[in-house]
Image (cartoon, coloured by chain):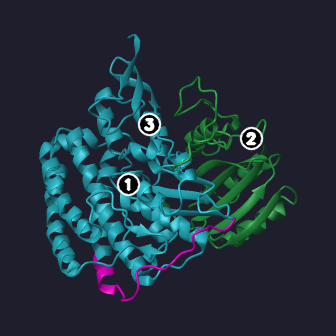
Amino acid sequence: MAEITACSGNLTGLEIADALSKKFAEGVTINSASPRRVYSQVNKEVFLEVCKFMKDELLFDHASLVSGVDRIDRIQAIYHITSYINNCCLMEIVVDLDHEAPEIDSVTPLWEGANYHERETYDMMGIVFKGHPDMRRIFLPDDTKFYPQRKDFKLKEVP
Amino acid sequence: MAEMWVNMGPQHPFNHGLWNLRVLMDGETIKYAEPILGYLHRGWEKSMENRTYPQIIPLSDRLCYGSSMSWSHLYCMTMEELFDIEVPERGEYIRVIVLELQRIVSHLLWLMAFGVDLGNLTVMLYVIREREMFLDLLQSITGARMTYNYPRIGGVRNDLPPDFERDCIRAMDYFQGKIDDYEKLCDGSKIFRMRTEGLGVVKPADAINLGLTGPNLRASSVDVDIRRDDPYSVYEEFDFDVCTHDACDTYARYRVRMDEMRVSCDIVKQALEKIPDGPVRVKVPKNAPNKTAVARVEDPRGEGMMYVVGDGTDKPYRLSVRSPVFVYVSAANHMLKGHKIADVPSVMGSIDMCLGETDR
């Protein structure tokens, strides 16, 4: 018999969204929610607290993907976190960061699976994850001076 | 004894693809293992920002040559989410058929590599022979052996060829007897058992926290399968088992993949029975709306995921990819610590490496 089974919890995405907006009156905006998806925008200041609450109270146990988007005027860190226990629900967290010095708390101490994703995001987008155990470049050489996923790094146009 | 760093790779018989495993040794015992990636980094995500949406389909095949269908399918699925398109039912059934065939092909390729890693060359020859049979089936649908360029945004490129059902059922029935042969070759071999059992143990809670997904997670006794738990395409219509194993070691990862091949045969048979008539593809607009979309699938290797940002033009503003193997690699230290260096091929071979999707 398997020790841990998916979908043994009873919270749906709607209830998760409800619990989050009750707990964090300020700083968390739920954009939309359905039984298996929650899309949210979170302020940088409360981000780590939201993640701790999600892990401990709402049983989100798996960090699927961490990525970054350069919006020219700001840089966004995008998190996709899954709860296997609660209905295999996937939660998207968007955090707006300053374009000049993007910095955010690392979630690697909570979910070890985010480790390489955060290193990759640092390598490609230049977001510094505070509290990460090993914040080095992962694909590019250590002495690289630019962040290739940013929009000011131009590729040659395809003819 | 003095400590010593050993570089296994980027050119080494055990690593399938270009990557380097730096191992800190104390005598023969591993104290620390650090993967070095980036030898195959092509800037895939960045170069997609210069391509139109249909141009990316054949390029997403190249994310992993071992299971290219599942990556181009994932790409098309993400775009359908972005464009808000419904795929015709027959198109979805054909997708399930080719995806499950692809899963068998991918697992066979893994078994071949795993056999070679452990010095079992017979299983390699047997497996490659049967894999060709499934490549023929896929070739009869798509025209290509490995990089298919078959799914389209809004469906699939073409319908199934005539007599496909007959050929497919015939291949499945033949193949199920062949899986028994592989099991006799591997499970019945004392050397194979000694080189797999009790190695690279990942406990269930650790496996979830380390981000393992797919067969490697199920081998750690966690009953999760995105096909069943977060169904996409028409997987809700099928009745299939999710294979798990309690041993949490390298042998368990081998067992789970063998069982999954049987389950995939079962799903293909059910799909061939239930497949409805109708169109296989719908027309889609050229320009994407100004929003984001995310989709995830149960890739043969684990949880594949894509996140796309559309900006109203015909090119994606940002396309980011979650590769399951990229996360497995980060667990190398956890799995290898305390083992002997001779166990590295067995443990790292069992996670099914693919560098195309790891480095992107």
Amino acid type shown at disc 1: Asp
What kind of element bears circle 3? helix
In-image side of A106 versus A23 (left or right): left
Chain (cyan): B
Point 53% across, 26% down: residue: A141
Amino acid type shown at disc 3: Ala
Whether residue B274 appears in magenta in the rendering, the answer is yes
Amino acid type shown at disc 2: Ile
- Colour representing chain A: green
Residue A34, located in which quarter of the rendered image? bottom right
Q: Position of residue B104 (x, y in %)?
A: 28, 62
Q: Position of residue B258 (x, y in %)?
A: 27, 58
Farthest top residue? B2
- Which label number is shown at residue B332? 3
- Which label number is shown at residue A104? 2
What span is in magenta? B269-290
Task: Find the distance from the CA under tag 2 to the CA under tag 1.
Answer: 38 Å
Chain containing the residue with disc 2: A
Q: Residues within 10 Å of mark 1 (few under 14, many from 20)?
A: some
In-image side of B98 versus B46 (left or right): left
- Do badges 2 and 1 share one subunit? no
The quarter of the image holding the N terminus of chain B is top left
Task: Find the distance from the CA under tag 3 to the CA under tag 1.
Answer: 20 Å
